[in-house]
Image: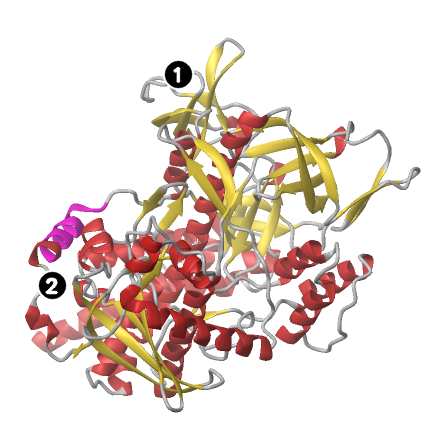
Amino acid sequence: MANKKNTKNFKNTKDKVTVESYKNKIVTYLNTGKKLIPLNELETKCRTKKSGRENFVQAFTELRDEGVVTVRKGMKVALCSRMGFKAAEVTRLSRTFGFAVTDDGTEYFIPGKCMMGAMPRDRVLITDIPSRSGEPEGEVIDILSFGSGTLTGVIAYVEGGLYLVPDIASRNHMIISNGESIPFAEGDKVLAEIVYRGRRHAEHKVKIVSVFGNSELAAACAESVVAASGVNTEFPQDALKEARKISEGGVQEYSFNNREDLRHMAIFTIDSSESKDLDDAISVEKTEKGWLLGVHIADVSHYVKGNSALDKEAMSRGTSVYYADKVIPMLPKELSNGICSLNPDEDRLTLSAFMELGEDGEMIKYCFGKSVIRSRVKGVYSEINAILSGKANDDIKAKYTCVEKEITLMNQLADILIERKKQRHTPELETVESKLIINENGVCCDVVPRERGKSERIIEEFMLCANEAAARLARDKKIPFVYRIHEAPPEEKTASLCEMLTKLNVEYPHFQEFKPAHAAAILENARGTDKYEAVNMMVLRSMAKAKYSEEPLGHFGLVLADYAHFTSPIRRYSDLAIHRIITDVLAGYDDKWLSKRYSGFAVNAAERASATEVRAVSVERDCEDIYKAEYMKQHIGESFTAKISSVTEFGFYAQLSNSVEGLVHIRTLPEGEYDYSEPVALTEKFSGVSYELGDTVQVLCAAVNVSEGTIDFVLDNEE
């Protein structure tokens, strides 16, 4: 009897149609016959009486949420692939347009009227529409799932009441649900949450969840940018508890076991004067065959163990975020500024990379090892630049007496490495970085170009060596890893670059496949001419974005087959990830074990590091724009010499020598009919007056919006 009962139960289980089975049946049925099938007909054809209705409903709901099926008018169902619909995620949104990325990675431009009220991080269904630019363009036809539904804006008095004027999504003001909101006032910069979704952005209703302060102050507006981005500003208690425990334990001597003691060596750090998270130190020696370069990196992986609360939070953050005079660290200050930071005259645990270089700078051999160091001095870029230029005062000379010989050697080695970079035809692209001067009241009182002297170049070259060695180690051992990759520019971008160079009458080498040497030649041909800045910008914009990958695809911009980020584990998770892998390599684990343990981890770490880097760059850029606008507010009505940095159909952007950029709108130009020669020039048809990329213009600062981080220039016709 028992056997019969078991057989009967088995038969019932076998007959029962699972959710997965239903999903397969639904997709199979929709793949045949008519494109659109009434929902009740689909259920009749696919559902079996034995299984009940629950599994069918769940299967259909999951397929709809995944963007596999869609319900159209009249409750008719279709397979999205047959209709040409694609599932995507809304990634960016302005007041008049947005962008969505499909599951295959294609980015679509979505006009504002075609957004259907979708917000960033919403999962949507899109369909192609005719494109005006040649790039993919689409329309949202359904919202599959809602994202966070938060947005920032300013409280404004409109038509007799207070409304939210959002920074994104709509030009129109939004109704505020007073009963659910915290107190707010006119002019406040706020964070809002959508409580009612309309079919258009202007129909959304919101509640105010955070008030940052006066929207005319950059500090308040920057806070709103950080909040809207989802970057964590506070650490979870379990992560803080771990950090405090590690910090209170200090650097114990038993931790020196199985480490090479390098405290006798002349090792030191070089950073900016304000840096507190010192994660890299250097040493350099002259040898009979060439050079011995040592790069010694804080051994963060010794303290931050895999799957710990600290590790989970670090992976979530991905990177430290720096803006104005503030930092949102990847690790708590007890680690980032404390026990992990390579402070002078303190024992610190490190992971050292030693590279034997030939007289010509070629890497002959490399090795990695766990070590303990004691930095001789906290080097400062400006002070070492003064030493190298012969302008150091007696106090600076005295500070660096203990590493005087090493400074001379590192300068000589850097020159060799820089020359070697030129020989492999590395494109020398130039970018202007800004330094924001913030006064004691937190207001931006000046913007100056960030100086980049010889010592900055030296450290850059030494870090490149260590990064290359780390990637070479992984490739040689065929182990899972997180590589820093930079792929060749897409063909359409190089074609566009050539077209623009032709319009500017700039010579360029003809090529079948675009190589770094071609980019280097283009820059060299333009160097010393009035077109150089424009050409530099065009080449820069033609490049692909660097990112992280578990595959060793090389670095186009550096002309290196092997490259990774190894030198900043305090502030980048990618570096911490490969420190953990290298640590197990040094412990003697074989490639089979390493592959089993780290294959999935490397993929996840690369994806997370890439995503959080994009987020951090966006936050830093937006905050910088806000502070620059605050600075220019003090200079409304003043005249400036600027260069045209980009041209659009609605005007052109002009950049000052300190990197501040503003828009000269086409409506403010002398009256006429303008032709837009994408993206090089705006030319008035009848007079022939042209505003061309790279031209010098005199502009007046006409208006500023601190909240939005925008600056409006007009031509100064009196000059």
Q: Nearer the viewer, residue 424 or 105?
A: 424
Q: Secondary structure at mark 2?
A: loop
Distance from the alpha carbon under mark 2 to that under mark 1: 51 Å
Residue 417 x %, y %: 49, 76
Bounds of the magenta segment: 235-246
Please tell me whether residue 284 is drawn above or below residue 205 in the rendered image. Answer: below
Note whether residue 403 is visible.
Answer: yes
Q: Residue furthest right?
A: 686
Query: Circle 1 sits on which residue?
Result: 185
Mark 2 or mark 1, earlier in chain: 1
Q: Nearer the viewer, residue 237 or 215?
A: 215
Q: Nearer the viewer, residue 150 or 264?
A: 264
Residue 179 x %, y %: 33, 18
Q: Main SS of the magenta segment? A: helix
Q: Which mark is residue 251?
A: 2
Residue 505 x %, y %: 82, 60
Say what amino acid the circle numbered 2 marks: Val
Q: Secondary structure at mark 1?
A: loop
Which quadrant holds residue 208?
top left
